[in-house]
Amino acid sequence: MGENKRLQAGVTRRRFLRDSLWGTCLAGLGVLTGLVVGKHRKTNTLWQIDPYTCIACGNCATYCVLDESAVKCMHAFSVCGYCRICFGFFGPEPVDITEGAENQVCPTGAIKRRFVEDPYYEYTIDEKLCNGCGKCVKGCNTFGNGSLFLQVRHDRCLNCNECSIAAACPSGAWKRVPAERPYLLKPALSEVEGMAAHPPQAEHGTGNHA
Amino acid sequence: MNRRFCTTNAGWLISVVIALAIVAGIFALARLDVTGSKGSGLSEQFVYDVKDLTKIDPNLILYEEIRRGGPISTGFTNARGLAVGPQESIYVAGDKAIRSFSESGQMLAEIDLTDTPRCLTAANDGKIYIGMKDHVEVYVCPDPRESGGRNGQRKRLASWQSLGDNAVLTSIAVSKNDVFVADAGNRIILHYDTTGKLINRIGRKDPQRNIPGFVIPSPYFDLAVGRDGLLRVANPGLHRVEAYTFDGDLEFWWGKFSSALEGFCGCCNPVNFALLEDGSFVTCEKGLVRVKIYNPEGAFVGVVAGPEQLVEGGASHICMLPGQCQAGGFDVAVDSGGRVLVLDTMKSTVRVFTRKEIGR
């Protein structure tokens, strides 16, 4: 009986050590697999903003871990109406229809306007000045065709695993997208309503452009 | 005894931890800013605010909504155009059909179509001209007594020639033997006879004739024939209404850009308009959804309804999806009694407004 107890105690100790070793090995294997999968996922997906869910709340300008947000305004030329009085460029109550700073909606003057032909103007974004606040996006979505929208610029974005803007996004517009299709662009107006982009004869870029 | 004590304590501890986790979860959910209304921490100059522009002096609102039975529900997912027929029937184009309603909102008849109608008008001779994307189709006004009102394809009289892939028809008007069709895609008015024969094109940019051309940033391009025999056309990119002869000569125009109530706000307005019996205009704007009255000379008279009456919460309409951006403009029509009918394209309902009695 006493011999049996000793044997049982010995077996239990050995089994305990053996099981512990196995457990440690399995846990290590799990961690290793997790790291490999995580690393693989990180390199193959990127953060991006769904322009149709984004409400341009302004969080992108303030929650990014970078001093200058990785979120910038983009302009879909194929959606734009090339309006003379663009409400993505002018404030809701402009004093005058001129490029004066007091008339512009963008507090940093990041939207540039270029005359194309009467009465059409082309609008481009100076990314160095854009802080991703989305004020112009709201103006364009309210009064215009919605050709201005926010996107994560991947030449700046650190692609943090836990993106602080994504965590603060009130509308859940932030999502992971495949690295081979890193931008969520707006379709051309012609795809929506069959209308050609303006102006009819002017030289201008096509598609989305920042 | 000790073991039982430890077990009891562990149970309590787990319960407390779970309770704390639930409380923390509820707290986190309550703090979650799902609308973005708590702000981003940016200063005021980064905030886009048009609330002040939505407020209208109540003394300037000349109309009130007829609330008996509420708005007329069209039953469409995507209502696009509105017209009033010769016998006060209300015609609505949407989805893949045309539906007619009585004044009280009862559905009288329906015409099934093979594609989505964009606009329509009901002529005095009982024909309905329907603008599809690139061509016009002509139907007979359905008789509600026949086949329970569902007349289908067999009442189609004609299908006119396609205007090409770029065509986006947005408005039709009929005047005796003339039919005018607004093509937003090609930025031109097409003048037909009632058989579908093209007579001429109106409004192409021509500095020699002082014609500025139509500026149509989004597919809103409305027209109507006035009692004075002139064609009225909205030129939304220039924020004005222009008057043309049937031969295509620009006679005069009125309208100006302004965020104030007297002008047309936004990049491109008015999106739609209708003519009252006395030649006054009922205009409809997108962005800041406003329905207003101008006299025949284009002077501001008053308001039918503003954003606070027309849009939920009184806010301006903000589009997110391309379809919303392109189809967020309301349509407007008037009947012979001077009532103003507004097609809410977001809710696919027709709201009816009547002039307030003097002294109210």
Image (cartoon, rainbow, N blue to C red):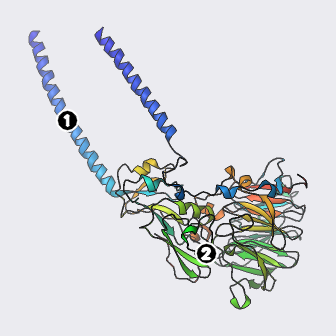
Instruction: Examine the rendered structure and indicate whether residue B7 appears above or below residue B93.
Output: above
Q: Nearer the viewer, mark 2 or mark 1?
A: 2
The residue located at (25%, 42%) in the rendering is A31
> Picture coordinates of residue B353 (x, y %)?
82, 56
Q: Amino acid at mark 1?
A: Thr
Q: Which residue is mark 1?
A: A24
Q: Earlier in the sequence, mark 2 or mark 1?
A: 1
Any part of residue B107 in sight? no
Residue placed at 35% from the left, 56% from the top?
A: A159
Instruction: Point out which mark residue B32 bears.
Output: none
Q: Secondary structure at mark 1?
A: helix
User: Which of the labelled discs sits on residue A84, or is there none?
Assistant: 2
Which secondary structure, mark 2?
A: loop
Amino acid carrying label 2: it is: Arg
The answer for which chain carries disc 2 is A
Question: Nearest the camera: B298 or A55?
Answer: B298
Seen at 28% across and 45% down, the residue is A34
One can see residue B243 in this view: yes
Q: Is residue A32 left or right of residue A194?
A: left
Taking the spot 70% from the left edge, 58% from the top edge, the residue there is B345
In this picture, is A174 found above or below B335?
Answer: above
Give percent across and percent down for residue B299: 81, 70
Q: Residues within 10 Å of mark 1 (few under 14, many from 20)?
A: few
CA–CA distance in space, label 2 to label 1: 69 Å
User: Does A185 sit above or below residue A98?
Assistant: above
Q: Which quadrant of the figure contains the N terminus of chain B? A: top left
Same chain for labels 2 and 1? Say yes or no: yes
Tell me which chain the residue with mark 1 is part of: A
